[in-house]
Amino acid sequence: MYRLFIAIDFPDEVKDHIANICFGVPGAKWVPKDQSHLTLRFIGEVEDFYYSQISDGLSGITAPRFDLSLKGVGYFPPRNKPKVLWVGVEKNEAILNLRDAIEKELKAAGIAPEERKFSAHITVARLGLQTPLNKVTEFLSANGLFKIESIPIEEFHLYSSVLTPSGAVHRKEATFGLL
């Protein structure tokens, strides 16, 4: 049994830049710098049989390389008590096309389609019930102008994830190059 997701990884200097804003919110469980990524598709638990189907399908994707820019911060769920803090991704047609190609291959492999609308972001923290709203507001204000431009994206990855008491442990299972 595998717990899988598909994501874009970032160079260390981008991860450092993101990590530099991750403070000042009591009760926040900050994502470790080495796990900073942009999830293209969370798959969840699958039987071993599906792993090779998924990997084979992803290896057939022919999508172009592209540049990605990060911009701003926010939280989920919108209009409710914040549970997740994130760094935003500027609108980018290439990432949407890659996401659609991934979804098509997963469907062909027998994986049920994602029901939630795709919202490109990098999760930076999960918030506890006792997290003060004013500290979330201060974080959003202090980092509203966060921006990293033109990050070259040349590949995406299939990850496995194991949940532990201290948090999820991610392992890169396969890498797929873009053209």
Image: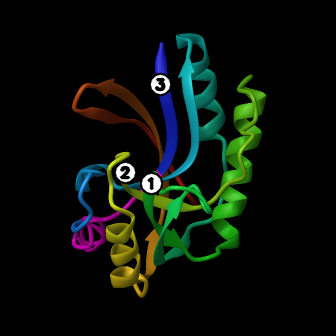
In the picture shown, does residue 5 fall above or below 156?
above
- The residue under the point 77% across, 29% down is 108
In this rendered view, identify the residue nearer to me: 142 or 52.
142
Q: Amino acid at mark 3?
A: Arg
Q: Position of residue 32 (x, y in %)?
A: 24, 51
Which residue is disc 2 drawn over? 127
Q: Which mark is first along the chain, 3 or 1?
A: 3
Q: Position of residue 171 (x, y in %)?
A: 33, 34
Tell me: 12 left or right of 84: left
Label 3 and label 2: CA atoms lie apart by 23 Å
Disc 2, disc 1: CB below 8 Å?
yes
Of badges 3 and 2, the one in the foreground is 2
- The residue under the point 52% across, 42% down is 6
Q: Which mark is first along the chain, 1 or 2?
A: 1
Quarter that holds the C terminus: bottom right
- The residue under the point 72% across, 42% down is 103
Q: Amino acid at mark 2?
A: Leu
Q: Is residue 18 magenta?
A: yes
Q: Quadrant of residue 132?
A: bottom left
> Disc 2 on helix, strand or loop?
strand
Which residue is disc 3 drawn over? 3
Q: Quadrant of residue 43?
A: top right
> Disc 1 on helix, strand or loop?
strand
Q: Position of residue 85 (x, y in %)?
A: 42, 60
> Disc 3 on helix, strand or loop?
strand
Label 1 and label 3: CA atoms lie apart by 21 Å
Which residue is disc 1 drawn over? 84
Q: Amino acid at mark 1?
A: Val
Q: Which residues are magenta?
A: 8-22
In this rendered view, identify the residue nearer to me: 179 or 57.
57
Q: Position of residue 133 (x, y in %)?
A: 39, 64
- The residue under the point 58% across, 57% down is 80
